[in-house]
Amino acid sequence: MFVLTRPSSARRYDRRMNDAVDLFLAQWARERPDLDVSPMAIIGRTGRLQQILGRRIGDLLAEEGLERWEFDVLATLRRAGAPYRLTGRDLVRMTMVGSSAMTNRVDRLVKRDLVHREVDPDNRRRVLVGLTDEGLATVDRVVEGHVAGEAVLLEGLDPDEQERLVGLLRKLLLSLGDGAPE
């Protein structure tokens, strides 16, 4: 447990009651007591959560034969609703990857027969990317385990804590300009 001492603000670290970020903060407080490192408490934890949760979700998806990026593309197309297709530009916007990376991803998913490309009937200059029957079946099967796995990862928080965390994270994301894509 952190114990603030005055006047140096040095913190003691107790391994039984603290996470790795607490250790880092205690080390900074000891080495640079003149710095307010409190922002690191949030930024460090969100970074560590991203690594830990990303790795665990990746492991769950690997059991289904998918990589995270594959699931992201398939899930984005599935969320678009029937007929489960988007332009390449919309896929890029919705997944926040570059167009060349998306082209590579779509190429790989086409080879696996999970998506297909077709000319947009409303604008022959555009290409649509859509789920194949196999892609639709895959994403529908995998998303159930994915959601269940995410719920297990959040069991350390009760429902009220989860709801408060959702609100705080949303507020922070919006303050950083991360609104929903149009």
Image (cartoon, rainbow, N blue to C red):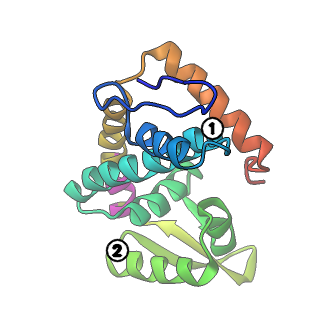
The amino acid beneath tag 2 is Asp
Q: CA distance from mark 2 to mark 1?
A: 49 Å
Q: Quadrant of residue 13?
A: top left
Residue 139 among those drawn in magenta: yes
Residue, disc 1? 38
Count the marks. 2
- Residue numbers of the magenta segment: 134-140
Residue at the far left: name it: 63
115 above or below 166? below
Check if mark 2's residue and mark 1's residue have beta carbons within 8 Å: no
Where does residue 107 sit, x and y in percent of width and height? Answer: 44, 83
* Label 1 secondary element: helix
Left or right: where 114 falls relative to 60: right
Residue 86 among those drawn in magenta: no
Instruction: Choose between 62 and 106: the one closer to the eye.
Output: 62
For marks 2 and 1, the one nearer the N-term is 1
Residue shown at 67%/41% (left/top)?
A: 36
Mark 2 neighbour class, 10 Å CA radius: few under 14, some 14 to 19, many 20 or more = some
9 above or below 89? above
Where does residue 89 sit, x and y in percent of width and height? Answer: 69, 72
129 above or below 55? below
- Secondary structure predominantly adopted by residues drawn in magenta: helix
Left or right: where 104 falls relative to 62: right
Residue shown at 63%/38% (left/top)?
A: 38
Where does residue 80 sit, x and y in percent of width and height? Answer: 59, 52
Quadrant in which the C terminus is drawn: bottom right
